Amino acid sequence: MGRGETRNTARLHTLTFHNPTDGAMEQEGRGRGHRKRQRCGHGAGWGRLGRAWELRDVQLRGSGRRGPGWPGMVTRGALGVLLLLHLASDQKNSTTMHEESRQPCKGLINANRFDDFGLEDTAKCFSACAQSGNESCNLGNLQRYWLNYEIHLVEKSLTETVNMSFLKALVKNINTNISEDLHFSLTPSQIPKQVTEDEHRHPDRVRLPRSLFGSLQGNRPVVRLAITILNVGSGNVFKGPRLSLEDDSSVLNNHVVGLSLGHINVTGLAEPLEITFSHQHQPPNVTLSCVFWDVTKGSSGDWASRGCSTDVGVNRTICRCDHLTFFALLLRPILDQVTVKALTRISQAGCGTSMIFLAFTVALYAFLRFSQQRLNSEDVPKIHVALSVSLFLLNLAFFINVGHGLKGSSAACWARGAVFHYFLLCAFTWMGLEAFHLYLLVIKVFNTYFGHYFLKLSLVGWGLPALIVIGAGSANSYGPYAIRDKKNTATLELCWFCEKTAISALYVTVHGYFLVTFLFSAVVLGLVALKIFTLSSATAGKEKWQHWKGFLTLLGLSSLVGVTWGLAILTPLGLSTTYVFALFTSLQGVFIFCWFAVLYFPSQSTVTSSSGTARADQVLTVSHE
């Protein structure tokens, strides 16, 4: 046996001697490791890895290339690599879990952290909290953070200015014994600074009256004032329940102005502070209102206007408030896209119903005129019918105008606008003539003879609107008109007054004309109400329901003189009054039919005893044709 054979035999004996023990130990170790790894939840992966190493071990044994100590080295190396991978995975998962557990938009982790990192980390929530119902955002905590930051600037911070992309702030010591008002610029892109009263280079500014600081002289000679300009973004922070992002309401330029004296509570100022916000010319259907952030409203605060007044100009709005806090200027479209569609449908449904009942009114008059000769000589029902005809034609013109929009040639659009304007003025005029006739009938009573009375009324009712329309048409006032939202997007287009060149004609010939007729009608109706209830008090013992009859009589007369159109004055108060206005004005024809039917359809005795005004209608006739 050679030396090589001896070494091989010895190696074989060595392998033979060690293999049973090593195999048992390895198998037992693999079993323990397998069970342990199964308990750790990684059994499948580790089992496959173990079987792969066993297969490799057998191959190396067969080839004789395994050296002494090789299994231990391989096992330790594999375990080391796997351990490093597992630790790296754990570190990545722990980092992710740490980021998730921070949740800065919950407003807790940075609650008392007002350094640059805390400010920037919290400011990210202006865009992150853009969706309503976001569970990772606590709007109350976020809004409280910025309110507390103003107090921090005054009470604890030594900083005099803050210049960040989303925040500009100035902190200044103010002597309470000042002799004049203080003025500070509020340009959003610049740090606020003190300016003089006549320095008009800063359209955005705040004026703090000297009386504000004079009222604090008894407490301290110097106070620390913080002025901040905060860009709150387009998300939900500092929007509150009052603002709905779906109906295009917003904070002007998404900027909020903060004024604070720290823990000194300033309310009920005798002379209010003034904040001037500059802005572009707003569409006529957008309302601007000065508001402050009220932390007591709701669960997380909301905008309120208590103690603030709004002075709206063409390119600027002045807010006057009697306290210090966060302020903003709200933009709220009265007629957004959804509202315009809803109002159009309500108006179309109401106008269609009115047209049916107005046609019934005319048909009932024709029937009663042929069946009762009494109506031939009375002008009262003729005036009612003339009003009904004007309203019927106005509703028809409305349907045609809204239905066609801006379709057709410019001449056709001009004609539709002129016709719609004419019948609108006719309706207003006949309402005024109803009030005039009521004045003669109930208030003046005596010396009310007019020859060809109804003919003269007709000349006014149909002729005066024609003259106005001819004048407006000669000035080329009619053309395309659009109702727009705050983004200057058209929400409704129709043929009316030219949007850019004839606005003054619209205000004079429509708004002004209506205002004159409405005020006259309201005064006459008030005098008639005084007469009716005076008569009711005199006859209260004779008739039990006299007050109710007087009230119902006023409701009927109000439909004739167009009181429902007066709701247009209240539309700036909110959408609810706009909906009420659209509903009641479009149903005016229904009210007129009910009044006409009650007044003339029953028998003579029933009508005579129904109301004092009905009795006056039939006894005190002013017609003498």
Image (cartoon, rainbow, N blue to C red):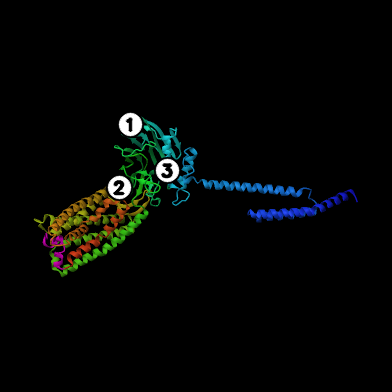
Q: Amino acid at mark 3?
A: Arg
Which mark identifies residue 501?
2
- What is the spatial separation of the Cα atoms under label 2 and label 1, in whole angstroms? 59 Å
- Depth check, mark 1 against mark 3: the one in front is 1
Q: Quadrant of the C terminus?
A: bottom left
Q: Position of residue 530 (x, y in %)?
A: 16, 54
Q: Amino acid at mark 2?
A: Thr
Nearest to N terminus: mark 1 or mark 3? 3
Foreground residue among 547 and 373: 547
User: Which residue is depicted at the point 47% across and 51% down?
Assistant: 135
Q: Which residue is mark 3?
A: 144
Instruction: Indicate whether residue 606 is drawn in magenta.
Output: yes
- What is the spatial separation of the Cα atoms under label 1 and label 3, in whole angstroms? 30 Å
Q: Is residue 283 left or right of residue 519?
A: right
Q: Amino acid at mark 1?
A: Gly
What is the span of residues highlighted in magenta in the rendered image? Answer: 603-624
Q: Report crowding for label 3: few under 14, some 14 to 19, many 20 or more residues within 10 A (C-alpha).
A: some
Q: Report crowding for label 2: few under 14, some 14 to 19, many 20 or more residues within 10 A (C-alpha).
A: some
User: Which residue is depicted at the point 75% across and 53% down?
Assistant: 25
Foreground residue among 227 and 579: 227
Q: Is residue 340 left or right of residue 153?
A: left
- What is the spatial separation of the Cα atoms under label 2 and label 3, in whole angstroms? 48 Å
Foreground residue among 485 and 609: 609
Instruction: Indicate whether residue 552 is drawn in magenta.
Output: no
- Secondary element under disc 3, as helix, strand or loop, is helix
